[in-house]
């Protein structure tokens, strides 16, 4: 099979610099492992992760809540304009095989719940403390868990 693996990054549209740096590093690692990064395509964690992936020569997919693909961050390679608001969170989870959650609020919580319900791996950095989420402290630890290593 020629299909690339897709790893999702989920997290807040607003974040502290520590979280943004972690997201950037995760994006780079996803690209370096020859995987595609999927996310919500907007600002904050999503933008930092996409920038990391692009800087490492990767591909990014942004599943947007709006009908306007122009609203994707500048580092989204493939914007998918859904027009369905936060219901797009389920599409993000259906797209990826594993997820890395970085901080986040209720939107991230919903994505974590969808992922766990679908029996997908979720690594979490400074995010919701929920059974089933593997809490990690470094980008290397997060990507290894997401890839099942």
Image (cartoon, rainbow, N blue to C red):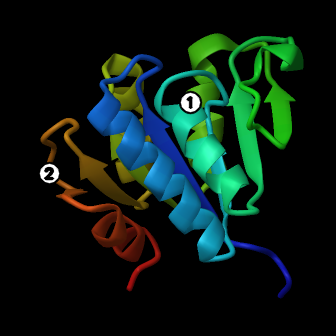
Q: Which residue is mark 2?
A: 131
Whole-number angstrom distance, CA of label 2 to CA of label 1: 20 Å
- Give the residue drawn at x 31%, y 20%: 105
The residue tagged with tag 1: helix, strand or loop?
helix
Q: Residues within 10 Å of mark 1 (few under 14, many from 20)?
A: many
Q: Do residues under tags 2 and 1 come within 8 Å of each other at their CB atoms?
A: no
Percent from the top left, x then y, of residue 122? 35, 56
Q: In front: 134, or 41?
A: 41
Residue 131 visible? yes
Query: What is the x, y in percent for residue 101?
Result: 36, 44
Instruction: Please indicate whether residue 118 sits to the left or right of residue 72 in the image.
Output: left
Residue on which disc 1 sits: 89
Image side of residue 43 versus residue 125, left or right: right
Residue 102 lies, with reference to residue 7, above or below; the image says: above
Check the image and report above or below for 140 versus 139: below
| Residue 3 horizontal/vertical position (percent) | 81, 76
| Residue 97 seen in this snapshot | no
Labels 2 and 1: the sequence-earlier one: 1
Q: Secondary structure at mark 2?
A: loop
């Amino acid at each position: 099979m020629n299909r690339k693996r897709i790893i999702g990054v989920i997290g807040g549209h607003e974040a502290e610099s520590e979280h943004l740096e972690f997201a950037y590093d995760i994006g780079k690692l996803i690209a370096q492992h020859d995987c595609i990064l999927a996310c919500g395509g907007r600002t904050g964690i999503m933008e930092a992760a996409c920038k990391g992936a692009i800087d490492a020569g990767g591909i990014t997919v942004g599943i947007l809540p709006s009908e306007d693909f122009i609203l994707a961050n500048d580092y989204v390679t493939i914007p998918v304009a859904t027009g369905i608001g936060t219901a797009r969170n389920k599409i993000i989870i259906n797209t990826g095989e594993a997820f890395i959650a970085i901080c986040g609020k209720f939107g991230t919580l919903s994505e974590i719940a969808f992922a766990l319900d679908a029996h997908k791996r979720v690594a979490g950095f400074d995010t919701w403390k929920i059974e089933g989420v593997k809490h990690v402290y470094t980008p290397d630890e997060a990507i290894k868990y997401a890839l099942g290593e």
